[in-house]
Amino acid sequence: MTFVLCGVVSVSHYLVVGAILFTCGVVCMALKRNALGVLMGIELVLNGANINFVAFGSEYLAGDGKSVLGLDGEVMALFVILLAAAEAAVALAITLNFYNNHATVDVDRADDLHG
Amino acid sequence: MNHETFGLSTNLFAFLDWHDFFFLLFAGVACVAAVMVVLSDNVVRMALHLVLSLGATAGLFFLAGAEFVGAMQLMIYVGGTLVLLVFGVMLTAQTQLVALRTPAGDRVIAGILAAALLAVLVQAAFSIESWQKPGQGVATAPTATPLGMALVGVRVDQVAEENLVRPKSGYLLPFEIVSVHLLVVLVGAAYLARAKRRRIPRSVDLVASADSTKPRLPVTASSTLVAGGPK
């Protein structure tokens, strides 16, 4: 019986959750006009990738008893979290600088380099 | 009657797999909150939904047996990065900037493209046979110690598994690179965001960002573009 509540959750289900978060993040990055909204889209994309790393690195979810990535998946997830924190700090500083200079956070108004 | 329902409920609980139950719970919260981040125009609500989505993701990490990564997700992402984002929202919260609307045509195109991308990704997720086998449910040891040893350069998990005489090198160099990178980034962020002389906001900017439904290029600007630029 393939009812979803009786022990059928596998790596694929985690990958689907990661895919949904990734897609939402890409749409958020492309669609939002607020620079902070674009930042939130980036966070969603990185989290979707992180779910994939953890799912592939998990011994608990491995159907063959041996996970694909092992401990490497979790180390990569930690690096992604750290780099996302660094990226958020710099991007927020740039956004605040832009707001100081232009009094807006609308990314469509950031066309000073437009030839 | 009462006895019947009681027996049914105990059967139901015996039938239920709690890993699957909590997976559905956390996955549902994460996905619905992520969709709400996309759909809401108010930036404060977007931040709130993002907190929900990232917190549910941390729950998924705990479920998958990566408890250290889940704890770091809660502390760094939900506790640090989101606080940073909320500060950004507060510092730039003017009434006309809180809800910048996207044109409806862009939303439709983005929805179609997102559906296509999601279809490809889901198809890829179910394309490999061994990924679909449910987990054996082996109880895993806590991963904090092997993670810490891997970050200082020793892979204790591979020594135990494969009886290697010399274990594979760990992540000492990437760890150092990431730490120096984090330091440089934070110094740079502090330099960029330092207090400067604030320019008086031009009234043109305020008006232009207030009515967002207006097309970006007026007719005169596009005609000068066609004619080869303003010069």
Image: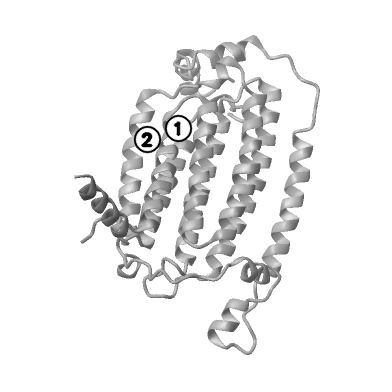
Quarter holding the C terminus of chain A? top right
Quarter of the picture containing the N terminus of chain A is bottom left
Counting from the top left corner in percent of width and height, residue B33 is at: 44, 38
User: Is residue B207 placed above or below B122 in the rendered structure?
Assistant: above
Label 1 is found on which chain of the structure?
A
Which residue appears at 55% of the width and 71% of the height? B141
Q: Residue at x 76, y 43 (%)?
A: B188
Give the answer, above or below, for where B86 lies relative to A12: above
> Which of B220 and B84 lies nearest the eye of the viewer?
B84
Looking at the rendered structure, which numbered label has been put on residue B221? Answer: none
Density class for disc 1 (Cα within 10 Å; few <14, some 14-19, many ≥20) is many
Q: How is the image coloured?
A: one colour
Disc 1, SS: helix
Q: Amino acid at mark 2?
A: Ala
Residue B131 placement (x, y as % from top left): 35, 66
Residue neighbourhood size for the residue with mark 2, other residues' Cα within 10 Å, grouped as few (<14), some (14–19), many (≥20): some
Question: Measuring 61% from the left and 58% from the top, which residue is drawn there?
Answer: A79
- Residue B117 at x, y percent in the picture: 35, 47
Q: Relative to B97, is B212 on the left or the right?
A: left
Element under label 2? helix
Looking at the image, is B215 positioned above or below residue A39?
Answer: above
From mark 1 to mark 2, how far is it between C-alphas?
Answer: 7 Å
Contact, mark 1 vs mark 2 (Cβ under 8 Å)? yes
Callouts 1 and 2 in the same chain:
no
Q: Chain of mark 2?
A: B
Mark 1 is on which residue type? Answer: Leu
**Disc 2: which residue:** B110
Instruction: Name the spot of residue B144 as percent of width and height, x first.
Output: 62, 65
Question: Which of the 4 image quadrants contains residue B111?
Answer: top left
Instruction: Please name the residue shown 58% across and 15% down the image.
Output: B95
Residue wearing tag 1: A31
